[in-house]
Amino acid sequence: MTLFEKIIARQIPAQIVYETADILAFRDIQPQAPVHVLVIPKKPIVRLSAASDEDAVLLGKLMLAIRDVAAQEGLAEGGYRVVTNNGDHGGQTVDHLHFHVLGGRRLSWPPG
C-alpha cells in the first residue's frame, strides 16, 4: 500500500483541503511554494503513463478538481502551476498518480 493509499484510508494524517468520491487533495508536507497541494485519484493509478482509456473520465475529474482547488486556495486570478512527475527520470517518488498545484508567488522557469 502506498503512502497516498494510506492517506486515502485515513491511516496517515494529512491536511485535506478537498474531497469527492473519486478525488482527494491535501497539503504537501514539504511545500515548494506558499501554496502546494497534491491532488490524487482515490483509484490507485501508478502514474500517468499507466492510465488506461477507461480512466479518461477520472482524469477529466482530476483536472476539474485542480481547477477547484486552485480557486479555493485563491490562486485562480494570479495563476498557478500544475506538475505531475512520471517515473524515476521524471522525479516521481510515490507510485500513485498525483498532481502538484503550486502557487502563491511568481514561479520561475525552468523548474528543474
Image: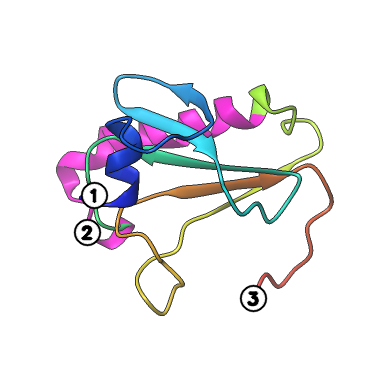
What crowding class fits label 1: few (fewer than 14 Cα within 10 Å), some (14-19), or many (20 or more)?
Answer: some
Callout 1: SS: loop
Residue 50 part of the magenta-drawn span: yes
Badge 2 vs badge 1, beta-carbon distance below 8 Å: yes
Q: Position of residue 40 (x, y in %)?
A: 39, 40
Q: What residue would you read off at disc 3?
A: 112
Disc 1 to disc 3, C-alpha distance: 25 Å
- Judged left or right of residue 87, residue 72 is right
Dot 2 or dot 1: first in sequence order is: 1
Badge 1 vs badge 3, beta-carbon distance below 8 Å: no
Q: Which residues are magenta?
A: 48-70
Q: Is residue 25 above or below residue 110?
A: above
What crowding class fits label 2: few (fewer than 14 Cα within 10 Å), some (14-19), or many (20 or more)?
Answer: few
- Residue type indicated by callout 2: Ala
**Residue ranking furthest to the bottom:** 89
The foreground one among 39 and 79 is 39
- Residue type indicated by callout 1: Ile
Q: What residue would you read off at disc 1?
A: 45
Q: Residue at x 28, y 34 (%)?
A: 42
Q: Is residue 92 above or below residue 71?
A: below
